[in-house]
Every structure is written in structure tokens, then in C-alpha cells.
Image (tube, coloured by chain):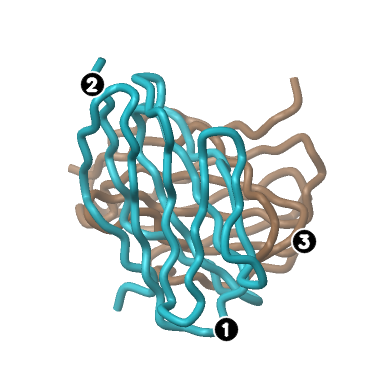
Amino acid sequence: DAGITQSPRYKITETGRQVTLMCHQTWSHSYMFWYRQDLGHGLRLIYYSAAADITDKGEVPDGYVVSRSKTENFPLTLESATRSQTSVYFCASSEGLASYEQYFGPGTRLTVT
Amino acid sequence: QQQVKQSPQSLIVQKGGISIINCAYENTAFDYFPWYQQFPGKGPALLIAIRPDVSEKKEGRFTISFNKSAKQFSLHIMDSQPGDSATYFCAASTGNQFYFGTGTSLTVIP
């Protein structure tokens, strides 16, 4: 089915470990986004990508790395996880940037112990 | 610094009542103001959006009111239903900037 999927849905990892969250969309949207959702902060943009091999920082990029070798995939890597990165992570995609509807995935709940 | 300030943090409304959620912004360059609805365990989904060239947009029971001079916009949910119980996020964007509010948890009591 068409849509946007994230994996894993739940992840527990230890401080200092590397972890990668996956995002896959089937609409061929140009833009893809990664957000983190925390109580009291709402949704904050981590990184976004305008096309394959084009990425840019959002509001809270520190500690995260992204890549986009294929249009449909946009993985997010925490190179050395910290407890402050415990959060729910949402991937989204859209046809354009600021004035276009963003379609969100179901989220990944990450706990760093 | 919060680019978009949203209030209240939580809201309880009786079935059939009107739910009102407010947002304020500072950056006058913002030119797109969407509202997203999020149910527990799901990702947000676009509910309704407005551009600053209109003062109001209505879609069914959902209305956005926009006050450009006050740099404020609000979501009104008429005849609120228990199925409207969710978290609502306002947002504002322009160019390569996109900011969400902190969210409002709405509970509609039957």
C-alpha cells in the first residue's frame, strides 16, 4: 500500500550506542523530514531533504546524521545516543516545502537508557 | 525561543460545545498556517490550513480565524464530538522555515 512507514516502531538502546531509524515513502515526494516530539516542545524539525543527496538542518540537528541516497528512503542516525534523545521520532514527506501538506509516518518511540 | 506560541496546553469541552485553540507568532514573513490533528499512537495529519490573505477559512465544523495585525490565528471546533478528542498543533512556515506549536490536548466529554 502507498504511504509512509517507519521502522522500528519501538527501540530501546543504551547511552553511547549508534542507532538508525528508518523511513520509507511510496509517493515519490521530493521532500522528507524528521521531527522529534517531546512534551512541552511539540514537534521540532531535526533535518529535512529536498531530494536525493540534498539535506539541510532544521531546528535541532545536533547529535543526528541523515542521508538520502534514494528518493524513497530517509534514514536518521544517532551516532552516539544520549538520554536527552529519548523521544518519539516522526518522519514526514511532502511535494514541496513550506506551503505543502506534510504526510507523517506512525512514529518511532526511542528510549535511551 | 518558541516561534509559534500555542494555548491552552489542555482543554476539556462538553459534547456539542465549541473548542477554541489559539496561536501567536512573531515572524511576519510566515505565509502558511496549518493545523494538524494527532490521535494517540499516530502521526499528525493535516486538518485545515490558511494563508494570510484571508481572515477566515471554514471546513465543516472546523474554522480557522486569522488576525494578521495581531499576528494571531485560532482553530474553532463547532459542535465538538468525543471523536475530536486528540492533540492539535498549529504551525507556521515560510521558505525553508517550518515551526509547530507545542500542542493542545483536547478532551470532549460525552
Element under disc 1: loop
Q: Residue furthest top?
A: B110
Q: Is residue B30 left or right of residue A43?
A: right
Query: Seen in the image, is A32 located left or right of residue A105?
Result: right
Calculate the distance from the C-alpha at mark 3 to the C-alpha at mark 2. 44 Å
Residue annotated with mark 3: A51
- Give me the residue at 24% from left, 26% from top: B14
Chain of the residue under the numbered disc 3 shown in the image: A
What tint does the image give chain B?
A: cyan
Q: Tell me where residue B96 appears, x and y as whole percent.
A: 62, 74
- Residue wearing tag 2: B109
Please name the residue that numbered disc 1 is placed on: B29
Query: Which chain is disc 1 placed on?
Result: B
| Circle 1 Cα neighbour tier, 10 Å, few/some/many (<14 / 14–19 / ≥20) | few
Identify by letter the chain in brown: A
Query: Which SS class for mark 2?
Result: strand
